[in-house]
Every structure is written in C-alpha cells, then in structure tokens.
Image (tube, grey):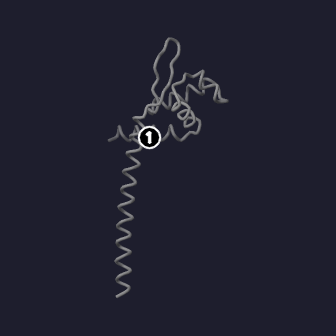
Amino acid sequence: MQATADRLDAVFFALSDSTRRTILERLARGAAGVNELKESFTISQPAISRHLKILERARLIRRSREAQRRPASVDTRAIADAESWIEHLQQLWEANYERLDALLAGELQARKR
C-alpha cells in the first residue's frame, strides 16, 4: 500500500510542473532524446535532463539506449495507476451524492406530509 502511495506521489509531483507536462505531450508524439527536446524549449540541456529524471522516476517515461543517444518515450503504466486512483475517488464521491440525493428526497417527502 505504501509503495502505491509513493508511486502516486511521484506521478502527481511530476505532473505538477508545466514543463514536464509539455515534455510528456511532446513525447506522446514520438520518442526523443535530450538534444531533440531542447530544440522545443528555452531551458538548458541540464534542465531538460533533470525534468526527464523526475518523469522517469515517476515511471511516466522510459529511456532506452541507442549508441550515445538515450531517447525517452512515454510509459503509460503510471498514468493508468493514477487514472485508477482518480476513478476510485470519483466512485466514492458519486456514492456520497447518491446518499445525499436520497436523504434530500426523503426530507422533501416528509415536508409534503
């Protein structure tokens, strides 16, 4: 359970930064190395590398090795975990709203009597 919470913490931390979200959007169009990503951003290559490490640690991307190049690509496993967690919350909220609706309907009927 703690491992799942730690993974979700890493995912939401990684997604909290707009540059990292933009990097993910770029990688969704295809794998890219640091130098290719740098062309799309006004930040330094070391800054791109730091963002990639955070995304990799959160399992939002994976990196391979092609000679000197280490292209990054989107890894959907962590997004699926986050989506499951959000869906679980949504189900809890919907159940609460349904109970509130039933309570209010009962209250309205009691007032009509």
Q: Which residue is drawn at 67% across and 30% down?
A: 42
Residue at left offset 36%, top offset 39%: 4
The three-letter code of the residue at mark 1 reads: Asp
Quarter occupied by the N terminus = top left
Give the x, y percent position of residue 52: 52, 28
Compared to 86, does 2 lie above or below? above
Q: Mark 1 points at which residue?
A: 9
Residue 59 in which image quadrant: top left
Residue at the far top in the pictured view: 67
Q: In which quarter of the image is residue 106?
A: bottom left
Residue 3: x, y in percent? 35, 37
Q: Label 1's element?
A: helix
Q: Farthest residue toward the bottom?
A: 113
Q: Residue at the location (53% across, 31% down)?
A: 29
- Which is more toward the observer, 79 or 54? 79
Going 35% across and 61% down the picture, which residue do you hit?
95
In this rendering, the answer to whether 32 lies above or below 77 is above
Residue 2 is situated, as x and y percent measured from the top left of the image, at 34, 40
Q: In this view, does 113 lie above or below 30?
A: below
- The crowding category of the residue bearing disc 1, from other C-alpha atoms within 10 Å (few below 14, some 14 to 19, many at least 20), is some
Q: In this view, does 113 lie to the left or right of 55?
A: left
